Image (cartoon, rainbow, N blue to C red):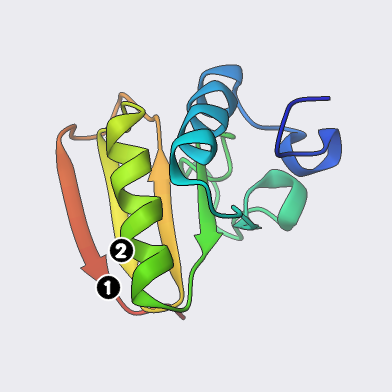
Amino acid sequence: MRPYFTESEVSGLAPALVERLVEARKLAMTPFVITEGPAAGGSHVANTAHARGLAVDLRCHDSISRFKIVKALLDAGFARVGVYDKHVHADVDDSLPQGVLWVGRSS
């Protein structure tokens, strides 16, 4: 079992993603709740970073937690981060543009 996450939470995730999530969680000092990833229901769209185990969405409802999560993800080396009103997206899909930060609304 990895610190901060149960095996079932990270089931189906790429090892590189899990390693960075563990590092980011340690830096953030705030809980990370995975709301989308293979073990949390995965993506309903085929061939996405989520479906391939290269991305997760982390629950986030307030600005303090959002700041801590985003800062920790960037400090842990994530180069693809999406900031939404109810979650933060993080992925390690190197087939997509790197060094990107975007904003959106949770569905």
Camera-side mark, 2 or 1: 2
Q: Which mark is residue 60?
A: none
The residue at 37%/55% (across/down) is 68
- Secondary structure at numbered mark 1: strand
SS class of the residue under badge 2?
A: strand
Q: Position of residue 22 (x, y in %)?
A: 57, 30
Q: From the top left corner, tell me how far across and down residue 58 is, in percent.
A: 53, 57
Which amino acid, mark 1?
Answer: Gly
Residue at the location (37% across, 64% down)? 66
Q: Quadrant of residue 3?
A: top right
Depth order, front residue of 30/51 = 30
Cβ atoms under marks 2 and 1 closer than 8 Å? yes
Which residue in the protein does label 1 denote? 104
Q: 68 or 89: which is nearer to us? A: 68
Mark 2 and mark 1: Cα distance apart in space: 6 Å
Q: Residues within 10 Å of mark 1 (few under 14, many from 20)?
A: few
At horizontal 31% and vertical 60% (from top left) the residue drawn is 67
Q: Is residue 104 above or below residue 66?
A: below
User: Looking at the rendering, which quadrant does residue 72 occupy?
Assistant: top left
**Residue 11's spot in the image, x, y percent?**
77, 34
Front residue of 41 and 23: 23
Residue 14 sits in which quadrant?
top right
**Residue position marked by numbered label 2 in the rendering:** 83
- Decide which of tag 2 and tag 1 comes sooner along the chain: 2
Give the percent coordinates (x, y) of residue 103.
Answer: 22, 67
- Disc 2 marks a residue whose amino acid type is Val
